Image (spheres, grey):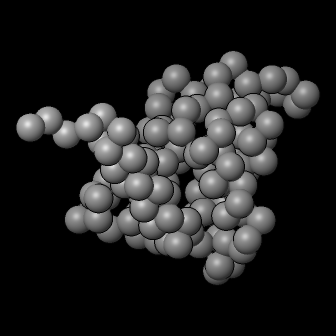
Amino acid sequence: MSIPKIWIVDRSRRAAARRVKRVLDASRGYMGNLGNPGRVAIRDMIYKPTEENWNRVYRLVVNGGGPAGRRTVWQLVSSADAGIQTKLAPGAKWSKVPDRFTVLRALEMVLLPAPTRGTK
């Protein structure tokens, strides 16, 4: 008996939604709680990675504690993906907008303890 494809897709979407929720719940800003606008911006970037959403998120400071300390989302993503540019001239466009998985993985590495990363 095979498992219907629709069930597999639905199950993976639920697992992805749980990963995003864990990251958003663990999000802390520079001075404490990241706040709703920051959380919404991160959520929008993960679910719809566009240049507009990246422009809202890249400069957010996330407090991961530990060795990572306080870093911007841009710093976290560029450490996870070498293809992300590390400098941007004023008024210039991004050469590459990071995909949702890179952003999620970078935030998970800083915000979540090791045993819970990527688990269902």
Q: Can I make out residue 18 in this image?
A: yes
Check the image and name the residue furthest to the left. 1
Is 37 placed above or below 97 here? Answer: below
The answer to whether residue 110 shows anywhere in this view is no
Residue drawn at (55%, 32%) of the image:
99
Image position of 88 with respect to 110: above or below: above
Q: Residue at x 64, y 22 (%)?
A: 96
Q: Give the farthest residue toward the front.
A: 1
Q: Residue at x 90, y 28 (%)?
A: 91
Quarter occupied by residue 31: bottom right
- Rendered location of residue 58, percent (x, y): 69, 46
In the rendered image, the residue lying farthest to the top is 95
Vertical placement of residue 101 versus 38, above or below: above
Q: Position of residue 25 (x, y in %)?
A: 53, 72
Residue 107 place in picture, x, y as percent: 49, 54
Which residue is situated farthest in the bottom direction here? 32
How many numbered circles are shown?
A: 0
Q: Nearer the viewer, residue 34 or 8?
A: 8
* Residue drawn at the location 19% of the way across and 40% of the way down: 3
Residue 82 in the figure: left or right of residue 85 = left
Is 117 left, or right, of 73 in this rendering?
A: left
For the N terminus, the quadrant is top left
Instruction: Depth check: give the residue in front, 100 or 1.
Output: 1
Q: Does 69 appear above or below 6?
A: below
User: In front here: 1 or 12?
Assistant: 1
Quarter the C terminus occupies? bottom left
